[in-house]
Amino acid sequence: MLSKREKDLIKEIWERLTPVAAEIGADALLRMFASYPGTKTYFSHLDISPNSSHLLAHGKKIVLAIAEGAQDISQLTVTLAPLQTLHAYQLRIDPRNFKLLSHTMLVSLACYLGDEFTPVAHAAMDKYLSAFAAVLAEKYR
């Protein structure tokens, strides 16, 4: 699915973004909420207004999980196993939302990285985020 070059590129990008994880994640969440308002229902108990502590904290968790998965993409299922269980059985998140977030994350990355988000980086990241979303949705089958 991903070449060694693509895996290295993905790992490098997420390592660079870790210091701004909260901002990138919050931006992707806000984009998802604006584009797909139904996704907000899972966050009704939190303040999800721009720059709120809840939004920034959850955005950071998301980006750090994505970055952790990028460390060894071949072990993505093992790395994400606790999140699969949490989202499927406890939070009962609609698995389609993982794909929606992967799309808004791509937009956030493009905005943040600008010209550094080359077509090669975009394609590699799209493949990785699609795999990430698919792995999170596996427990629903």
Image (cartoon, rainbow, N blue to C red):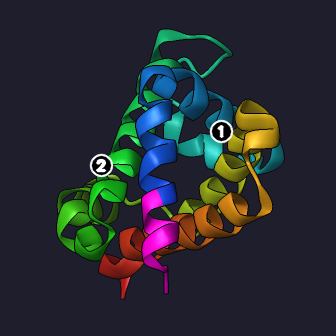
Q: Nearer the viewer, mark 1 or mark 2?
A: 2
The residue labelled by disc 1 is 28
Which quadrant of the structure image shows residue 86? bottom left
x then y, percent, for residue 18: 42, 30
Foreground residue among 43 and 55: 55
The residue labelled by disc 2 is 68
At horizontal 22% and vertical 72% (from top left) the residue drawn is 75
Q: Is residue 48 left or right of residue 10?
A: right
Judge whether 87 appears above or below 31 on screen.
Answer: below
At horizontal 46% and vertical 76% (from top left) the residue drawn is 134
Judge whether 14 appears above or below 52 on screen.
Answer: below
In magenta, the rendered stretch is: 1-8
Other-residue count near label 2 (Cα within 10 Å), few / some / many at <14 / 14–19 / ≥20: some
At horizontal 66% and vertical 17% (from top left) the residue drawn is 49
Residue 4 magenta-highlighted: yes
Which quadrant of the structure image shows residue 23? top right
Q: Amino acid at mark 2?
A: Glu
x then y, percent, for residue 120: 71, 65
Residue 31 appears anywhere in the view: no
Q: Amino acid at mark 1?
A: Ala
Q: Is residue 49 left or right of residue 35?
A: left
Q: Earlier in the sequence, mark 1 or mark 2?
A: 1
Foreground residue among 79 and 81: 79
